[in-house]
């Protein structure tokens, strides 16, 4: 069951009053939720509320709180993804999957082989943030990832001490081998970089080498960029926690 995001200011006397117009339309008009049915809510303090709809009015509804608790549905590492912007459907899929996998931030990259114009990317950030927001509700995450403004590889690495580049060519090792020889600090931000469908350019590979950034392989297969994102993030999450 998806949960819905509310503000703690809407909570009083073991009830939640929802007067947000969009939320009201979605729950009452679109989902046609009836009195007595269960609804899940999450506030900005990451408190989950199990409720039942008890009252429907013209422009608000009320739910009785049956149970509340601190949500643990979030990643236990500070993982960020920076990926070269993809064409529409693949980009949306990447944002959805990154959100479902728990990343703290999604950073659109403009790379040498990026097929989307930089001017177009700038106008998409708000839309991509909404897509992440909707994905949070579907997977019941306790926190909301931020979609950052588009940037370049040389700029983004300045904000991270731990950077991992997944690339299909010129790779140095697989991730499990890498972390055996290189300690990953779970308390610090980890940045995963993924390239476009056409891969990174020679200039970008030279940049990675010059800046001592690890080039990690996902195996012998060549993935679509949005599939590579899912595989890379899953590899890092499992490797850092269990490797």
Image (cartoon, helix red, strand yellow):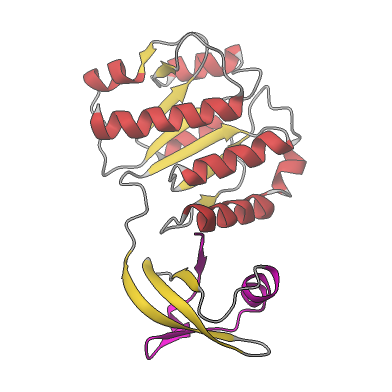
- Which residue is pictured at 73% across the width and 27% down the height? 115
Q: Using the image, determine if residue 58 lies above or below residue 147.
A: below
x and y, in percent, of residue 225 in the image: 60, 25
Does the magenta-highlighted stretch encompass residue 95?
Answer: no
Q: In which quadrant will I find the C terminus?
A: top left
Q: Quadrant of residue 173?
A: top left
Q: Using the image, determine if residue 24 lies above or below residue 184.
A: below
Q: How many marks?
A: 0
Q: Is residue 84 left or right of residue 104?
A: right
* Front residue of this view, candidates 187 and 41: 41
x and y, in percent, of residue 180 in the image: 23, 19
Does the magenta-highlighted stretch encompass residue 15?
Answer: yes
x and y, in percent, of residue 94 in the image: 59, 37
- Which residue is pictured at 58% across the width and 43% down the height? 95
* Front residue of this view, candidates 202 and 164: 164
* Front residue of this view, candidates 94 and 31: 31
Specify start and end residues of the magenta stretch as a single range. Answer: 1-30
Q: Is residue 59 left or right of residue 158?
A: right
Q: Using the image, determine if residue 86 lies above or below residue 140.
A: above
x and y, in percent, of residue 90 in the image: 67, 34
- Which residue is pictured at 50% across the width and 19% down the height? 207
Q: Is residue 166 left or right of residue 83?
A: left
Q: Quadrant of residue 210?
A: top left
* Front residue of this view, candidates 133 and 52: 52
- Which residue is pictured at 52% across the width and 36% down the height? 82
């Amino acid at each position: 069951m998806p949960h819905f995001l509310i503000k703690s200011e809407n909570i009083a006397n073991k009830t939640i009053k929802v007067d947000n117009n969009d939320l009201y339309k979605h729950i009452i008009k679109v989902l046609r939720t009836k009195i007595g049915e269960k609804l899940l809510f999450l506030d900005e303090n990451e408190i989950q509320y199990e409720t039942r709809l008890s009252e429907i009015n013209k422009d608000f509804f009320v739910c009785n709180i049956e149970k509340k608790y601190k949500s643990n549905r979030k990643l236990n590492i500070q993982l960020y993804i920076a990926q070269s912007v993809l064409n529409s459907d693949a980009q949306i899929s990447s944002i959805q999957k990154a959100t479902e996998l728990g990343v703290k931030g999604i950073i659109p990259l403009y790379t040498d082989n990026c097929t989307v114009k930089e001017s177009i990317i700038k106008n998409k950030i708000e839309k991509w943030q909404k897509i992440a927001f909707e994905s949070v509700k579907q997977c019941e995450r306790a926190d909301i990832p931020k979609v950052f403004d588009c940037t370049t590889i040389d700029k983004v690495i300045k904000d991270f001490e731990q950077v991992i580049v997944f690339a299909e060519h010129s790779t140095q090792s697989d991730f499990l081998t890498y972390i055996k020889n290189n300690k990953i600090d779970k308390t610090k931000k980890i940045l995963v970089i993924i390239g476009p469908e056409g891969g990174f350019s020679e200039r970008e590979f030279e940049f990675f080498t010059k800046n001592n950034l690890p080039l990690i392989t996902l195996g012998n297969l060549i993935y679509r960029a949005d599939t590579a994102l899912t595989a890379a993030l899953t590899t890092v999450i499992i490797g850092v926690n269990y490797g």
